[in-house]
Image (spheres, rainbow, N blue to C red):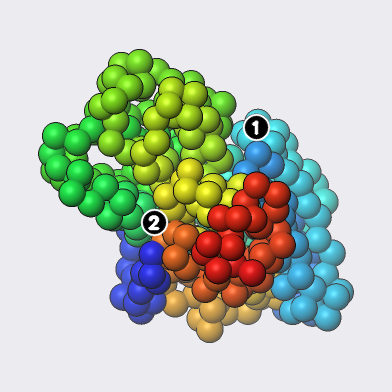
């Protein structure tokens, strides 16, 4: 769910995240409708996040977005928040509540990017603009911010090949554990990883993991070990850190030690990297993503242009040329923990180097 830094030229990112559209496509709208009056700092912002199994949403995204909105509105904004707990139907109900409460703008991280389309349309019909956050929700969204998701997959794949070294041959068998099919990001991570791994190694088993569940990933890994053979797996592509935890539990139970990727730089993932159980994660700096969402939401609520914030354009199956901010990512290994999550204040050395991890931290110079 990340390298030395992967450079992304912001101005060159005319990214199309979906196939060709249809007559139903609607163009991304970066300004308020003519009937919308300019507003001051006293705005009402709805924030809907998708789940709480992944640590990032409650620990990073929510407080970062909230803080930035308040900074931009002199603490006058009202923020209404809900978490869908991985339930698409519940999230649709939460959108209805935001509409009933007359929020001025909605920041939405969709549980199911396609299923949420009707809710996005309802919000637009009610005069509420929607900022798609982290996942490209279908429907007439007005803005979008996320990471360069294919680059995330490429970063993971390249790191896995580097970890394999001389073992990265066409006869080497890899297990791929991808994210949920309801998350459009998962398909992009998968596409990016395949673009690097295909032809270099053999994908012996591959899974699309329901709800990004670590428990499901654990079961899938157990099945892969049984199918491929205990001594025949060279490495594992895991799309995020939560699933990597479940995968590593299965590998350890079988007495297998191979490189495993991840994403999101979760604390448990970073600790596994320190101890050598997990090879890498993808560090996605949440602050730039969260701040971009807040800036776009406040601008839309006030009827202002997004030109100074959103330099990219992204298209989905139902919206074209949506003003967007795409944030670059970094491959996180034991070699750059100091220069990434510690330097950026995501974690302290004390957070990471607890108990059984202290000696490994000392060897890495994390003091």
Q: Which quadrant is home to the C terminus?
A: bottom right
> Do callouts 1 and 2 mark residues in contact (Cβ within 8 Å)?
no
Q: Is residue 103 left or right of residue 216?
A: right
Residue 295 visible in the shown view: yes
For marks 1 and 2, give the one nearer the viewer.
Answer: 2
Circle 1: element type:
loop
Residue 351 badge: none
Residue occupying image coordinates x 61% and y 73%: 344
Q: Is residue 221 left or right of residue 109?
A: left
Of all residues, the one furthest to the bottom in this rendering is: 308
Residue occupying image coordinates x 49% and y 39%: 244
Mark 2 nearby-residue class (10 Å; few <14, some 14–19, many ≥20): many
Residue 102 visible in the shown view: no
Q: Residue 101 placed where, x, y %?
A: 82, 51
State the separation of the CA atoms marked 1 and 2: 25 Å
Residue occupying image coordinates x 40% and y 43%: 260
Residue occupying image coordinates x 69% and y 36%: 85
Mark 1 nearby-residue class (10 Å; few <14, some 14–19, many ≥20): some
Residue 152 badge: 2
> Which callout, 1 or 2, points at the residue further toward the start of the chain?
1
Q: Residue 197 placed where, x, y %?
A: 23, 46
Q: Is residue 134 left or right of residue 287?
A: left
Circle 1 residue = 87
Q: Quadrant of residue 152?
A: bottom left
Q: Nearer the viewer, residue 332 or 365?
A: 365
């Amino acid at each position: 769910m990340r390298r030395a830094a992967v450079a992304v030229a912001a101005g060159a990112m005319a990214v199309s995240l979906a196939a060709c559209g249809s007559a139903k496509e609607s163009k991304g709208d970066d300004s308020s409708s003519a009937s919308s009056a300019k507003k001051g700092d006293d705005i009402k912002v709805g924030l809907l996040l998708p789940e709480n199994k992944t640590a990032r949403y409650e620990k990073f995204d929510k407080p970062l977005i909230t803080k930035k909105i308040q900074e931009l509105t002199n603490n006058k904004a009202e923020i209404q928040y809900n978490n869908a707990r991985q339930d698409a139907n519940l999230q649709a109900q939460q959108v209805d509540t935001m509409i009933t409460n007359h929020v001025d703008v909605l920041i939405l991280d969709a549980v199911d990017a396609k299923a949420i389309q009707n809710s996005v349309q309802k919000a637009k019909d009610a005069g509420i603009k929607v900022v798609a956050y982290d996942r490209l929700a279908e429907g007439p969204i007005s803005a979008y911010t996320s990471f360069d998701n294919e680059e995330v997959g490429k970063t993971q794949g390249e790191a896995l090949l580097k970890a394999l070294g001389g073992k990265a041959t066409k006869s080497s068998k890899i297990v791929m554990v991808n994210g949920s099919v309801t998350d459009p990001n998962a398909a992009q991570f998968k596409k990016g990883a395949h673009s690097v791994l295909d032809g270099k190694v053999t994908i012996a088993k591959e899974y699309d993991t329901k709800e990004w569940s670590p428990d499901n990933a654990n079961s899938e890994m157990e099945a892969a070990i049984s199918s491929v053979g205990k001594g025949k797996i060279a490495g594992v592509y895991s799309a995020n850190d939560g699933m990597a935890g479940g995968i590593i539990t299965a590998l350890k139970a079988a007495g297998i030690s191979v490189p495993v990727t991840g994403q999101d730089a979760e604390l448990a993932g970073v600790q596994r990297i320190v101890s050598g159980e997990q090879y890498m994660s993808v560090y996605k700096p949440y602050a730039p993503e969260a701040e971009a969402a807040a800036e776009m939401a406040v601008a839309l609520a006030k009827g202002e242009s997004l030109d100074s914030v959103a330099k990219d354009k992204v298209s989905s199956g139902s919206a074209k040329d949506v003003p967007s901010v795409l944030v670059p990512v970094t491959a996180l290994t034991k070699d750059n923990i100091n220069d990434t999550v510690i330097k950026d204040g995501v974690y302290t050395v004390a957070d990471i180097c607890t108990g059984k991890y202290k000696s490994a931290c000392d060897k890495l110079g994390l003091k």
